Image (spheres, rainbow, N blue to C red):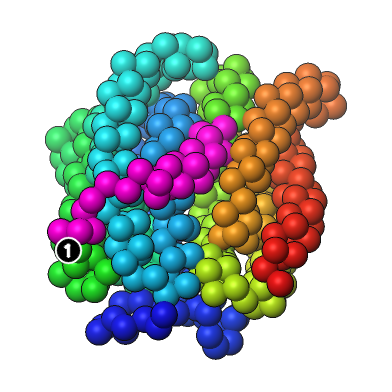
Amino acid sequence: MKHTHNNRKVVLNMTEGNPIKLLITFAVPMLIGNIFQQVYNLADSIIVGRLVNANALAAIGASSSVTFLFFALCNGIGSGGGIITSQFFGSGDEKMVRKCISNTAYIMLIFPSIVGACAYMLSRPILEMLKTPGDIMPDSLSYIRIMCVGIVFVSLYNFIASMLRALGDSKTPLYFLVVSCILNVGLDIFFVYKLGLSVRGAGIATVIAQLMSGAGCFIFAIKKNPYFKLEKDDFKIDSHLMMSIIKLGVPLSLQFSMIAISCMALQRVVNSFGAVAVAAFTATSRMEQIIHQPYQTLGTALSTYTGQNYGARKKDRIVEGFHKALLFMAGFSLCMLPVMQLCGRFFVSIFVKESDVIAMGAEAVRITSLFYVFLGLIYVVRGVLNGLGDAFFALLNGIVEVIGRFTVPIIMTTIPAIGLWGIWWSTGVVWFLSGFTAWLRYRAYRKNIFGKMT
């Protein structure tokens, strides 16, 4: 069945044409969008760190792994729905594409509301379990609880963005992220600086901006994308389809949440070294979030590309796209290594003024940048396997990361010759372990799944 949509500008069929050109065409707008999304966190961190103090920055940092956990639980379901949508799109089944959009929407309406309510109630016990320093506890708690209210808005945006990307539209989510990001920065300055609301102001600004991006993206999709023009029959609950979405989405949620839990385990180790270490770790983590974006974008582009080609049963294109993506990833990793080795101090100083925090953060970045290629390998392999619908890998990868984050930092920080720096050496080691595991899984899974496609 061929695609009969009227407006070809809002979709991208990735089952035909040059794979690398398609990946770049799809990935570049999404990369810009992902970087703008990170500006939410960067704006909070820079404005709070520079206009208030390092303790305020530490408060946001101490709560970030917790908020990431709650967001991750919701985002996995949306990603699962997006992957299945891309497979239906690749096979040319337009009716199932529309049904997948509506059935994923039902799940994404209920699930984030439950997670947000539970997260709000559990925020204090979790912060206490992480041994959050007492001088930053009140601000950390306020920030988390405000972000809990915003979970529904974040999920709305991520659901629409996931569906649009499944159809090859990576530009629409970008436009609304740019607008909301500019709004977020303006509101940050107003609430934090003008009204003196400190960390609470940063949280309120972020939630408002997320609401605007989610609502704007939703309205645009309904008006402009033909697949969102649902008819009465499309709104029917399809229990089999819903179970398929959950079956793929839950392992993805568990993978994301396990990574979040592993970050919380690392945060607990960091917190034990005091506020200076927490501030340095927060600054370097914010920098790494930017480094993650090209890898994450490439992985997401591969997921859509693989999903569509899997639906079209074109295995050779999947393999070719994977190999080209690996080359891109390796090239980017090599380029970033000297940049971070030489300019780490400058980047850290963007976030804080305190010289001891800057010195610690600069050395930390020199350590983690040695392992960027393994971080990239995780995302590239994950993108292909997610596109193929390999739910087991998501769970496996999350388990490896959790075990690594729980054990490696504790071991390395207790070695006298390493000490505090074990926080960042352990990050690199865990990237290596996860990347190597991902590669092994790809080799095993490729033989199995591609054998069925012949």
Question: Is residue 256 located in the magenta-colored stretch of the structure?
Answer: yes
Residue at image point 77% right, 42% down? 433
Question: Is residue 306 located in the magenta-colored stretch of the structure?
Answer: no
Relative to the observer, which residue lies in front, 188 or 239? 239
- Looking at the rendered structure, the kind of residue marked 1 is Glu
Relative to the observer, which residue lies in front, 295 or 390? 390
Q: Which residue position is annotated with label 1?
A: 231
**Looking at the image, is 436 positioned above or below residue 30?**
above
Residue at image point 56% right, 49% down? 288
Relative to the observer, which residue lies in front, 1 or 184? 1
Answer whether residue 184 is visible to the viewer in this image: no
Whole-percent x and y of residue 138? Answer: 33, 17
Whole-percent x and y of residue 290? Answer: 51, 55
Can you say which quadrant of the picture contains the N terminus?
Answer: bottom left
Q: Quadrant of residue 190?
A: top left
Report whether 205 appears left or right of 350. left
Q: Count neighbours of disc 1 (C-alpha within 10 A) and say few if under 14, some if 14 to 19, many if 20 or more.
A: few
Total number of numbered labels? 1
